[in-house]
């Protein structure tokens, strides 16, 4: 009996015991109810009938399969006054409630204290992201030493939903919680130096004064290369800028660690980043024809292809054997026209300038299949989220035309956020005020030799809460055709609301079959990109339903965790890829990303970015740049303009790499290429430098006599003997065997 009482005391005291520490854990005790009522916010509401919720998992994984729409979570928690009494700063309390997927509002004792959408908008425009906010210590919503009720209202469309993640706690806002080390400036490249300015920024009234330590280490040896400590002071009104220039080191990434220590509180904040290093050789002044070897269009539809060629301008373009119906603009390299008959047309392109010329054999395939090689382009989502507008699209198109189209980049795709709130009197979809002239914008994109993409959902609403195409499929496909659209991303989202609770395979296919039929009525080649996160193993039936590509996963983020878990789990999808039909492991997260109106440098290290582009190319993935194209730094540009790497992605055989070696700390993926070549990616998935070898008798090397380092575009000496590579943490060696 005594023992039982003792256990009871411990259990009852558990929240207080935790609270005597610096934080209150909030991972337990949550309850969930699917549905929506504002009466579920106030503390007096009786939630005793609600089901327990596991906040480490989305609600789909705990008895609510494919649930879209509203749900509420509640938890009861005592917030002890000792928390503030022991804190160095006593201004506000910080709540971390994992991630909210998608829209969310948090009520503390009935008061709305957080929402993940903008003023003037609503919860249906809220977006998946970490839920972290603070409430003033003196705010009456906080009940010190008493029970508090936290109620979270969630609105989910498409994919997973709910409140979930690893970080659920309450603590006092710390001195460093309001400080950011902003490293979003670009590196400047001198001939032998690398420089950058970073900023220390404060978000509270506290005056920060202390030391900033700047340290460069070699991750291979862990040795320090440079170290410097400076005084630093800053406040909310005046940030501290630190500018450095270091000698440009050998071709690898070094680790920079910035550590600020505040003298008064003794607290520290630290951030690391890798120095960029460029492997892609400088583009030569002599002409060079890049891009794929094949291009497909359907007979009778408008034809548009710009010959991708680099070299000193002006370039003069020539095409020998161009079939009747097509004409080439010799000054721009843009081929237009209409082709009548299904056939393969071999053509020879020649591009010249005053330094010389280059020629390339090319095949125009007029037939039923378009998108014979994966789409190379840009999509607005990872950069701009719902803040995309006409100007941002034009900026991207200009940047693509100036810097990327010569390497084969073509598509300018508008994602969600372009649609007006209601259809016009004829039921047609119309753009909102951010896109005053969609046809004019499309014409402009075409005038640059580029193609235009758009976004919709088979459901009544898109993921961002905008109008979808449900029951207007024919009409929308016709509108896209009238505007001159070349690519449609079709995102499942609220289609869950209009299909079966537990969809069958046929239910998964249906909305894509319906839109396929609508697109087929339009006299235009519109690439059809399915976005339904891989449901029903879409890679097994995407081709049959007429998709040119299909997403195989949920949304990517600019972290190693997201990148590696998506990228390295694609082996299962490999059988689905063929010319015109590709698996899509989601868009690129290099450059400045942000999913909204503020951008940050990708959080991937330079080596992780090499892995990203290499792996996606091996996977024959559509490469859709997801960054602010108005601010392409040299390193990002070098990642996107390596013709040897792009050639692996664009290979005409259309195969996807297979995972041939999977160890705890490294993986090898291999892709068969047209003409018998093979591409191999050796990925170091560990946190340390590694030396990885391929033996001469390794199956992978059999029959090959030459190897080519794809990023540096140099021959590798050693084949057919043992090949040994030193590969940085999370980095890659990409090889082409000939
Ligand atoms: C998501 C999709 C994203 C983006 C977004 C727009 O479902 O995966 O790539 O399109 O919707 O609302």
Image: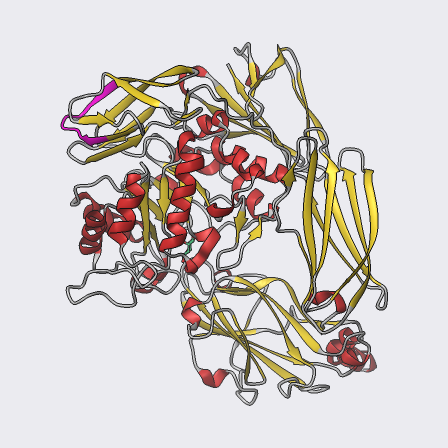
- Residue 662 seen anywhere in this rendered image of the structure: no
Image coordinates for residue 42, horizontal then vertical, percent = 53, 86
Per the rendered image, the range of residues in magenta is: 336-346
Is residue 159 rendered magenta in the image? no
Is residue 339 rendered magenta in the image? yes
Viewer-nearest residue: 241 or 682:
241
Image coordinates for residue 578, horizontal then vertical, percent = 36, 30
Q: In which quarter of the image is residue 417?
A: bottom left
Q: Which residue is drawn at 27% across and 56% down?
A: 437
Q: Quadrant of residue 386?
A: bottom left
In the image, residue 500 sits, relative to residue 281, either above or below, namely: below
Residue found farthest to the bottom: 44
Viewer-nearest residue: 82 or 306:
306
Is 159 situated left or right of 209 in this image? left
Viewer-nearest residue: 322 or 634:
634
Dividing the image into four equal quarters, which quarter contains ligand 1?
A: bottom left
């Amino acid at each position: 009996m005594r023992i039982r009482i003792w256990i009871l005391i411990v259990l009852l005291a558990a929240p207080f015991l935790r609270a005597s520490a610096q934080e209150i854990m909030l991972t337990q005790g949550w309850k969930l109810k699917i549905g929506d009522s504002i009466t579920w916010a106030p503390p007096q509401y009786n939630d005793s009938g609600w089901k327990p919720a596991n906040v480490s998992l989305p609600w789909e994984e705990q008895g609510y399969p494919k649930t879209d729409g509203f749900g509420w979570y509640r938890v009861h928690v005592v917030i002890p006054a000792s928390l503030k009494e022991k804190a160095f700063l006593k201004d506000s309390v910080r709540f971390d409630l994992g991630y909210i997927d998608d829209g969310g509002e948090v009520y503390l004792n009935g008061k709305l204290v957080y929402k993940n959408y903008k003023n003037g908008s609503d919860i249906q425009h809220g977006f998946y992201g970490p839920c972290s906010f603070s409430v003033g210590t003196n705010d009456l919503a906080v009940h010190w030493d008493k029970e508090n009720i936290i109620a979270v209202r969630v609105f989910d469309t498409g994919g997973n939903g709910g409140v979930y993640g690893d970080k659920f706690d309450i603590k006092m806002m710390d001195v460093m919680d309001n400080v950011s080390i902003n490293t979003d400036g670009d590196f400047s490249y001198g001939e032998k130096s690398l420089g950058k300015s970073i900023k220390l920024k404060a978000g509270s009234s506290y005056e920060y004064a202390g030391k900033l330590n700047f340290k460069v280490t070699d991750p291979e040896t862990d040795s320090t290369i440079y170290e410097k400590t400076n005084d630093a002071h800053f406040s909310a009104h005046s940030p501290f800028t630190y500018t450095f220039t270091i000698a440009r080191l050998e071709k690898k990434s070094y680790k920079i660690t910035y550590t600020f220590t505040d003298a008064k509180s003794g607290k520290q904040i630290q951030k690391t980043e890798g120095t960029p290093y460029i492997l892609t050789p400088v583009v030569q002044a002599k002409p060079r024809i890049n891009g794929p070897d094949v291009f497909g269009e359907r007979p009778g539809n408008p034809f548009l292809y710009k010959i991708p060629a680099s070299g000193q301008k002006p370039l003069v373009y020539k095409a020998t054997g161009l079939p009747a119906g097509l004409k080439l603009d010799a000054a721009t390299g843009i081929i237009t026209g209409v082709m009548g008959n299904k056939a393969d047309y071999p053509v020879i392109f020649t591009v010249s300038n005053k330094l010389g010329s280059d020629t390339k054999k090319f095949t125009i395939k007029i037939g039923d299949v378009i998108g014979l090689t994966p789409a190379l382009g840009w999509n607005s989502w990872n950069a701009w989220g719902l803040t995309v507008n006409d100007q941002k699209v034009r900026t991207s198109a200009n940047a693509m035309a100036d810097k990327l189209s010569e390497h084969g980049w073509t598509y300018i795709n508008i994602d969600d956020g372009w649609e007006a709130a209601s259809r016009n009197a004829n039921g047609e979809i119309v753009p909102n005020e951010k896109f005053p002239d969609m046809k004019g914008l499309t014409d402009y994109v075409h005038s640059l030799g580029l193609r235009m993409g758009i976004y919709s959902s088979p459901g009544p609403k898109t993921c961002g809460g905008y109008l979808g195409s449900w029951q207007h499929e024919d009409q929308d496909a016709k509108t896209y055709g009238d505007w001159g659209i070349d690519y449609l991303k079709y995102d499942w989202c609220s289609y869950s609301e209009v299909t079966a609770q537990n969809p069958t395979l046929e239910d998964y296919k249906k909305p894509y079959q319906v839109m396929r039929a609508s697109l087929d009525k339009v006299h235009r080649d519109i690439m059809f990109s399915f976005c339904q996160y891989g449901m029903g193993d879409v890679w097994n039936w995407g081709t049959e339903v007429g998709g040119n590509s299909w997403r195989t996963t949920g949304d990517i983020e600019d972290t190693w965790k997201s990148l590696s878990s998506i990228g390295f789990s694609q082996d299962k999808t490999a059988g689905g890829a063929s010319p015109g039909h590709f698996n899509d492991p989601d868009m690129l997260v290099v450059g400045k990303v942000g999913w909204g109106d503020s951008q940050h440098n990708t959080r991937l290290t330079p080596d992780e970015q090499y892995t990203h582009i290499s792996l996606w190319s091996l996977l024959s993935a559509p490469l859709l740049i997801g960054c602010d194209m108005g601010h392409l730094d040299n390193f990002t540009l070098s990642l996107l303009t390596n013709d040897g790497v792009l050639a692996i992605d664009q290979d005409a055989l259309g195969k996807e790499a297979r995972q041939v070696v999977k160890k705890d700390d490294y993986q090898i993926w291999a892709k068969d290429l047209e003409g018998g070549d093979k591409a191999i990616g050796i990925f170091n998935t560990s946190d340390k430098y590694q030396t990885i070898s391929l033996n001469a008798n390794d199956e992978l090397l059999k029959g090959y006599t030459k190897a080519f380092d794809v990023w540096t575009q140099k021959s590798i000496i050693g084949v057919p003997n043992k090949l040994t590579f030193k590969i940085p943490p999370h980095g890659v060696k990409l090889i082409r065997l000939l």
